[in-house]
Image (spheres, grey):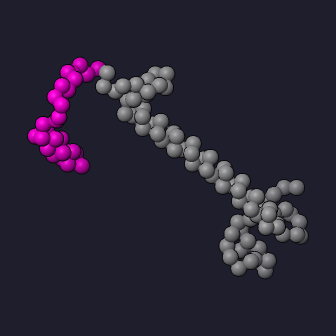
Amino acid sequence: MPRQQQSESSLGSQGYGERSISMYDYEDVPATGLERVRSAVGITKEAVRAISITAIEAVREGAIFMGVIGSRGELVNPFRHIDAAIWTEPEVPRDMIDTAYDYCEELT
């Protein structure tokens, strides 16, 4: 039988005093508690799936925007074109740390 989603508050005198969504058949017998739980789980499952797909797409688009995704979809080193010396001092000088913090504050 075809199923229809309808708010219980729109059922008129059959309403249960609270607004909720339930799935029911076109029969005189209202849906049981178990059927309501099953339909809610099904709806929740689909909502979670849609949200996770959207989140994955957002992460992928962000990575593409930052330039860390290669032509075949793999992660790449965004600094591969920089030819710089490796830091050889055991500790970073304090004035460089202060300058880095000042720069970050200016950016924000």
Number of marks in the rendered image: 0
- Judge whether 28 appears above or below 90 on screen: below
- Which residue is located at x 43 percent, y 23 percent? 70
- Judge whether 67 appears above or below 24 on screen: above
- Judge whether 32 appears above or below 80 on screen: below
Residue 99 visible in image: no
- Which residue is located at x 45 percent, y 36 percent? 61
> Residue 2 placed where, x, y %?
84, 55
Q: Quadrant of residue 53?
A: top right
Residue 51 visible in image: yes
Left or right? Give the position of 51 relative to 66: right
- Judge whether 106 appears above or below 32 on screen: above
> Residue 40 placed where, x, y %?
71, 59
Quadrant in which the N terminus is drawn? bottom right
- Which residue is located at x 49 percent, y 22 percent? 72
Left or right? Give the position of 34 relative to 91: right
Residue that lies at the very extreme toward the left in this rendered image: 95
Q: Quadrant of residue 9?
A: bottom right
Is residue 107 rendered magenta in the image? yes
Is residue 86 rendered magenta in the image? yes
Q: Quadrant of residue 63?
A: top left
Which residues are drawn in magenta? 81-108
> Residue 51 placed where, x, y %?
57, 48
> Residue 30 placed where, x, y %?
84, 69
Left or right? Give the position of 17 relative to 91: right
Residue that lies at the very extreme toward the front in this rendered image: 90
- Which residue is located at x 47 percent, y 25 percent? 74
